[in-house]
Amino acid sequence: AQSVTQLGSHVSVSEGALVLLRCNYSSSVPPYLFWYVQYPNQGLQLLLKYTSAATLVKGINGFEAEFKKSETSFHLTKPSAHMSDAAEYFCAVSEYTGRRALTFGSGTRLQVQP
Amino acid sequence: SQTIHQWPATLVQPVGSPLSLECTVEGTSNPNLYWYRQAAGRGLQLLFYSVGIGQISSEVPQNLSASRPQDRQFILSSKKLLLSDSGFYLCAWSVPPLGNTIYFGEGSWLTVV
């Protein structure tokens, strides 16, 4: 079964600092990987996705993630945090068989300090 | 373009009362449909998914059920709500083949009192 682990349920950075949110996956086949963002009381919005093309994936709002097969990781980064980046971020892996749904990590809440 | 509508946005229901949350998708045909639940301070749990009309798969034994009476309509129901059913419910859709993005509705807040 596929799974996702997000290290750190809360991350706090200063405005302008590097954002790094960690995600490790477990999969027996090459995965599709996603990062979603959730603002308070809203649904989830796709930030970016990896589907076996380029290993460095660029998304919206200046975020990017790098797929590293050797480390089974898909960490999310942004060079300079903005106050509007404060939200909860979810990493997810897509399944190839069976329920054909996304399996999500437990989420990381990003706080941006002025 | 495709859109997803989910309602009601907020619901406060007493224990033992019924529940009906509805979701419709516009602008696409034969989507995969999903219900997820997000409990307070926790991640997202897949409750049900459907790959076609009348085809429902349940992920977790629970007090809820789902139905898909039309191609782009997905309904989450309960006959008798429990306190533990409280949470944020998200409907979502995707277009096969596998690997395509899953798109989420705005969610429904359910508080069982």
Image (cartoon, coloured by chain):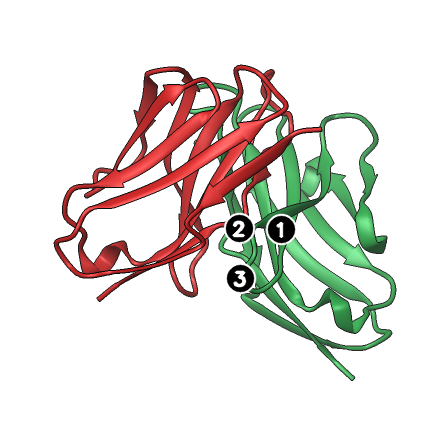
Chain colours: A green, B red
The residues tagged by marks 3 and 2 sit, at their Cα atoms, a distance apart of: 23 Å
Residue B72 image point, x, y percent: 48, 23
B110 in relation to B37, above or below: below
**Residue at which label 3 appears:** A41
Q: Whole-percent x and y of residue B10?
A: 41, 58
Specify the amino acid type for callout 1: Cys
Neighbor class of circle 1 (other Cα within 10 Å; few <14, some 14-19, many 20+) is many
Decide which of tag 3 and tag 1 comes sooner along the chain: 1
CA neighbours of label 2 inside 10 A, class few (<14), some (14 to 19), many (20+): some
Q: Residue at x 59, y 49 (%)?
A: A44
Are callouts 3 and 1 both on one chain? yes
Q: Is residue A63 visible?
A: no
**Three-letter amino acid code at disc 2?**
Thr
Asked whether A8 or B28 is in front, the reply is B28
Per the rendering, the mark at residue A5 is 2
Crowding at mark 3 (Cα within 10 Å: few <14, some 14-19, many 20+): few
